[in-house]
Image: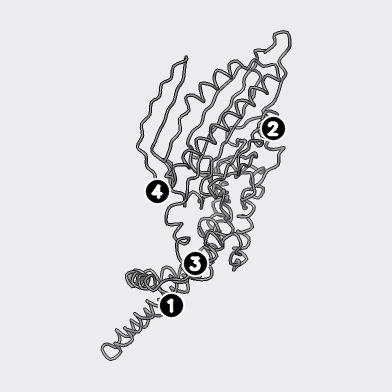
Amino acid sequence: MIERILEEPRLAITRSPAVDEVTVCLHAVAASRRQAVRDGALIGALWLALAGLNGFPRWIPLIGLAVVLAWAAVFTEAYIASWGTIAHSLRKDNFANSSPPPAPTDRVRQQIARVSAAATGNVTVYRGYNPFGGHGWIRAGWSLALDTTKPRDPAKPVVPFTAAELNARLSVDVSQLDIPGLSVGDRLLVNGSDVHDDQRFVPDPYGAPVAWTDQATLSALMTQPEDRARPYLTAEIICWDGELVWSAFVRLVVNDNSLFVETNYTVLPPFRPGFYTIDDLLARPTVGQIVRLGWRCGMRLPKAMLDCIPGASTHLFAGVRCWRNDRRDRRLIRELSRFHHGALFSPREAAANGDSTGVVYHRYFQSLDEQMVMKIVDKRIFNTLIDFLSSKNVDPDELKRRSEHIINNSSVSIGGDVHMTNSALGGSTAVSGSSTFSGST
């Protein structure tokens, strides 16, 4: 997180729904500094051990002292990480009322300000194939094209409309759904390799891309679509205390004789089990826990001794590393006149119990809730489209038929590996499915 977010001032920062990314970054910096102190102590212990070997056998007690000091350094850092004051503030019951550690340097403070701006921004500058970076993985979706030249009432003309007008109507109607944790807004998605020469997104060629764009720019891109920068109406639902984040991305394209509608549904599943360890620990360790921690620290000691010099160097020369990266980036921009500004890392996706091949839920009801919100939002989208087109004297019969087909033939992935396909056409029902449920309890 430190190297991919806080040390990359020219790259975009991905929004992480249901995560206080500022607090996470500050705790990561504090943990890095704590580990640097531990590595410094290990280097001192290593020096004592080498001195003992140099004076062997007369100075052999130094070797024993070095081992004890090294173990104490590893044990102390591990104890603080599990039961220290900061560890208590990271527990689920205390997190909301705790204050994060302060930013130690101006460079970190500047990047933290960008992290904060990204959390409330409406621009996603992504890297790679998936444009919905930070919002998880695509689970379902559909698209359709409709003829808008056929009037509902042949005696009246079709009323022209724009994608921005329909988008505004959808935004209002979807936001009125009675779903806890629902937020609706417009979001612009653009690849980081396409923004360097576009002053709308990168005003300073040596700077970072913007995290926010105004509604006029979004509306213009809806009315006059571009290949690379695409606005989406985004409905985001945060449930299960932030463990599950479901998002809908809806894009509209209107021309003289047709309407194209595209939807993509993404999911951020619960965290991997290891991220809940801090919540399971007692406020004060038992004797058995201390003994087991001491044993584990002893087992980790050889590796910790080998890693202490590289670890301390990484922290000590962070400023040099940032300076070298800055020179490299400036040379690329100056000589090649291009630069990839896409975000490198999403903390929420990195912690999620899933990937592009599937997700794992901790509760069966979480998989049911994913299906529920998808069908509710689907229904509202179709109802709004039908009402809107009818108000413009566009015949909605084709849309009604297509919507029934899409809803009845919906395909969702449950628990990571279950695929259910339901179809109900012509009065008969056919259900086919393959299930290899993969969930944790």
C-alpha separation, residue under disc 2 versus residue under disc 1: 60 Å
The three-letter amino acid code for the residue at tag 4 is Thr
Q: How is the image coloured?
A: one colour
C-alpha separation, residue under disc 4 versus residue under disc 2: 41 Å
Q: Is residue 411 left or right of residue 210?
A: left
Disc 2 crowd rating (10 Å Cα; few below 14, some 14-19, many 20+) is some
Question: Please, what secondary structure does the residue beneath circle 2 have?
Answer: helix
In this view, the residue farthest toward the top is 155
Mark on residue 168? 2
In this view, the residue farthest toward the left is 57
C-alpha separation, residue under disc 3 versus residue under disc 1: 14 Å
Question: Please, what secondary structure does the residue beneath circle 4 have?
Answer: loop
C-alpha separation, residue under disc 4 versus residue under disc 1: 41 Å
Residue 133 place in picture, x, y as percent = 53, 44
N-term-proximal mark, 2 vs 1? 1
N-term-proximal mark, 2 vs 3? 3
Disc 4 crowd rating (10 Å Cα; few below 14, some 14-19, many 20+) is few
N-term-proximal mark, 3 vs 4? 3
Residue designated by label 3: 32
- Residue depicted at x 64% and y 38%: 186
Mark on residue 41? 1
Q: Is residue 396 shown to the viewer in this render?
A: yes
Q: Is residue 176 left or right of residue 335?
A: right
90, above or below 13, in the image = below
N-term-proximal mark, 4 vs 2? 2
N-term-proximal mark, 4 vs 1? 1
The three-letter amino acid code for the residue at tag 3 is Ser
- Nearer to us: label 3 or label 4: 4
Residue designated by label 4: 441
